[in-house]
């Protein structure tokens, strides 16, 4: 069964302006890397726009109203917070990102793909129920998890290896015992959350903070000894990955020293969790990664592992 690649050119139209790290060139680098011959068997699908009802199921009414009311002009940039920017194409791109995440769930649960990689922007794991934050507008992973419940699933896990803690996903999951969030991330670092003491309502939040300058050994140990066993104990019916590649040693926004090979190793380990508990169903969503070369290398390592090549 193939692996699906879900994306949409509307995601290029989220214009964050010159010198912003979360820029259209990120997605271009990812998609160019996935044009190599070894990836020709990917099942390429267009990301639909998420319906408004799916956004409202996760985010507060007033926040969604405010996002839909945004109408920046052709050259206008609106700051939603210090570093999250809306342009004329932002809402459409964000709806494609959320809708692509939902389409990834459909792909694996309807049985026309074994795994899905959703290459979209803006990312989502910092978006909280009531606000945009950290380059993120809508909580793509949480929207995907909620959508999985329309397929009859109940227990859904998100594994997040972005270098920044996914405060938004955690905020949405922490009060629901049937949603599980596992994260490795640099700490201290933006956004300042993700302490081991943050457990959720039923031990359904597991954080593995890593000190600045941490490298491959500590990164792998956090997953092997802590996060993977926690995911196994939870036994999800679907595994969603928040795939950020900014823990790479070349990334300019943090100070971890993860290698490209570590992303391949971790992807294989996470696929093992999925094989043990949910028929191998994995939906992976692009989050961060701001050095274009490291982002392309990390993505290709990740997708190769999803494809088992």
Image: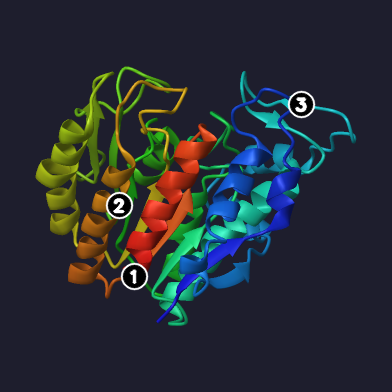
- The tag earlier along the polypeptide, 1 or 2, is 2
- Reply above or below: 279 against 122: below
Instruction: Tell me the residue at 36%/46% (across/down).
Output: 173
Mark 1 neighbour class, 10 Å CA radius: few under 14, some 14 to 19, many 20 or more: many
Q: Nearer the viewer, residue 279 or 264?
A: 264
Q: Nearer the viewer, residue 26 or 118?
A: 26
**Position of residue 79 in the picture relative to residue 134 (left or right):** right
Quarter of the image for the C terminus: give it: bottom left
**Position of residue 24 in the picture relative to residue 173 (left or right):** right
**Position of residue 207 in the picture relative to residue 6 (left or right):** left
User: Which residue is the site of mark 1?
Assistant: 281
Q: Which mark is residue 89?
A: none
Q: CA distance from mark 3 to mark 2?
A: 37 Å
User: Which residue is the site of mark 2?
Assistant: 264
Q: Nearer the viewer, mark 1 or mark 2?
A: 2
Q: Nearer the viewer, mark 3 or mark 2?
A: 2
The image quarter in which residue 123 lies: top right
Quarter of the image for the N terminus: give it: bottom left
Indicate the position of residue 273 as horizontal and vertical percent values. Answer: 21, 62
- The tag earlier along the polypeptide, 1 or 3, is 3
Q: Which mark is residue 78?
A: 3
Instruction: Tell me the residue at 29%/39% (across/down).
Output: 183
Instruction: Tell me the residue at 40%/22% (across/down).
Output: 254
Indicate the position of residue 15 as horizontal and vertical percent values. Answer: 74, 36
Q: Secondary structure at mark 2?
A: helix
- The tag earlier along the polypeptide, 3 or 2, is 3
């Amino acid at each position: 069964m193939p692996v699906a690649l879900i994306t949409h050119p509307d995601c290029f139209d989220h214009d964050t302006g010159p010198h912003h790290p979360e820029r259209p060139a990120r997605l271009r680098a990812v998609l160019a890397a996935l044009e190599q011959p070894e990836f020709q068997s990917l099942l390429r699908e267009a990301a639909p726009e998420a319906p408004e009802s799916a956004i409202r199921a996760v985010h507060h009414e007033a926040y969604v109203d405010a996002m839909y009311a945004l109408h920046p002009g052709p050259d206008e940039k609106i700051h939603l917070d210090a570093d999250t920017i809306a342009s004329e194409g932002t809402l459409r791109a964000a709806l494609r990102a959320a809708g692509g995440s939902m389409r990834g769930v459909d792909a694996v649960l309807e049985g026309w793909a074994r795994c899905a990689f959703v290459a979209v922007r803006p990312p989502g794991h910092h978006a909280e129920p009531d606000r945009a934050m950290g380059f993120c507008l809508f909580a793509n992973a949480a929207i995907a998890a909620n959508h999985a419940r329309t397929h009859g699933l109940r227990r859904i896990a998100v594994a997040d290896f972005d270098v920044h803690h996914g405060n938004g996903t955690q905020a949405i999951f922490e009060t629901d015992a049937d949603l599980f969030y596992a994260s490795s991330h640099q700490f201290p670092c933006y956004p300042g959350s993700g302490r081991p003491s943050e457990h959720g309502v039923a031990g359904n939040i597991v954080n593995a903070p890593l000190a600045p300058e941490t490298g491959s050994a500590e990164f792998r140990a956090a997953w092997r000894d802590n996060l993977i066993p926690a995911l196994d104990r939870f036994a999800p019916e679907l595994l969603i990955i928040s795939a950020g590649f900014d823990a790479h040693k070349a990334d300019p926004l943090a100070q971890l020293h993860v290698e490209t090979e570590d992303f391949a190793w971790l992807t294989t380990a996470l696929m093992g969790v999925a094989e043990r508990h949910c028929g191998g169903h994995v939906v992976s969503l692009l989050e961060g990664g701001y050095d274009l070369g490291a982002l392309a290398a990390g993505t290709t390592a990740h997708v190769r592992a999803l494809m088992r090549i």
